[in-house]
Amino acid sequence: MRIGLYAGDQSDIETRIEQVRAVAEHGLASVFFNQVFAWDPLVVAALVGAAVPEIELGTAVVQTYPRHPISLAAQALTVSAAIGNRFTLGVGPSHKPFVEGVYGMSFDRPAQHTREYLTALRTEFSGAGHVQLPGVQPPPVLLSALGPVMLRIAGELADGTVTVWATPATISDHIRPHIDAVAKDPRVVASVMLSVTNRPDDVRREIAETFGFASDFASYRTLLDRQGQRNVAETVVAGDEEAVAAAVRAYADAGATDLLVSLVGDATEKARTLRLAGELVRSQ
């Protein structure tokens, strides 16, 4: 299982470049940037990729509704070419409160929207559409998917899936069976909050205060109910080095091809967690 970093903070560009350099020095395989209402993750990937060689860079995830697939295809191909084909494009439809409440667009039939979007994106990447960039290698595409319908779409039209809040049991018993039914050797990327800490209850409480609202998003609520959990904070892996390492191995055993480590806690705890992630990479 490859281990990378999920970069969810919104620090300035120079800080992000230094962060990715540090991740690369620890031996991690990748860094994926999220999309919130701040820095553009594709531009960040291009800038960071120009400064830091070799490591894979990606998005987890770019919201599909506000970006036309033709425009996103041109952006993604440009980034991929600029950083030597080290870019992976993660996309997803996001959630109704954002799509309707912020962008003012309809979130009607998100699965149908996603299927049509990925079909158009693949056409553009193939060179049979409007975007003409001869010789440019299209990036792999991951789809954020948690339910059976979206996992089927990921297996049929993408190179795999990127998940969030999913436990090892969910990966092995739900994610893998549904995507494996329609895809051969899909990439299954699990994004997980980790903290090597002496205060695990406090860390989970902090995550509940910051991200607990996400527990009521429809797709996350369905996932948490499946896992017997009430709040996304319950999915946080927190404890000493031995406990966190065991949890990481559980994701590998469950069938995750990649683990994206989201560092949580204070600065010291984040440093301990990153150090452990590097040790686990070297021990594989």
Image (cartoon, rainbow, N blue to C red):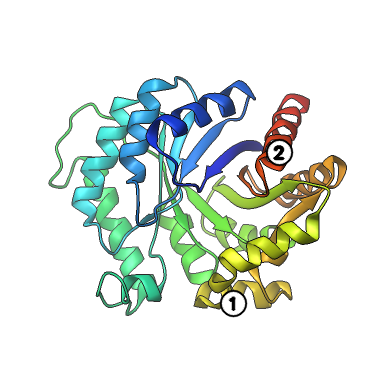
Q: Residue at x 65, y 49 (%)?
A: 264
Q: Position of residue 39 (x, y in %)?
A: 34, 46
Mark 1 highlights which residue?
Answer: 222
Q: Examine the rendered structure and indicate whether residue 77 appears above or below residue 102.
A: above
Locate residue 69: give its quadrant.
Answer: bottom left
* Along the viewing direction, whichever of 210 and 253 lies nearer the viewer: 210
Residue nearest the viewer, comparing 17 with 122 = 17
Quadrant placement of the C terminus: top right
Judged left or right of residue 196, residue 174 is left
Locate residue 137: give its quadrant.
top left
Q: CA distance from mark 2 to mark 1?
A: 34 Å
Q: Secondary structure at mark 2?
A: helix
Does residue 164 lie above or below 283 as drawn?
A: below
Q: Are marks 2 and 1 in contact (CB under 8 Å)?
A: no
- Eyeballing the image, is 182 above or below 74? below
Q: Is residue 105 visible?
A: yes
Q: Which residue is mark 2?
A: 268
Neighbourhood count class around disc 1 (C-alpha, 10 Å): few under 14, some 14–19, many 20 upward: some
Q: Amino acid at mark 2?
A: Thr
Pointer 2 local density, CA inside 10 Å: few below 14, some 14–19, many at least 20: few
The front one of 131 and 163 is 163
Amino acid type of disc 1? Thr
Give the residue at x 31% y 76%.
100
Q: Is residue 140 above or below residue 134?
A: below
SS state under label 1 = helix
Front residue of this view, candidates 10 and 155: 10
Tell me residue 70's x, y (percent): 19, 51
User: Which residue is at a point 35% across and 23% down the rendered structure image?
Assistant: 50
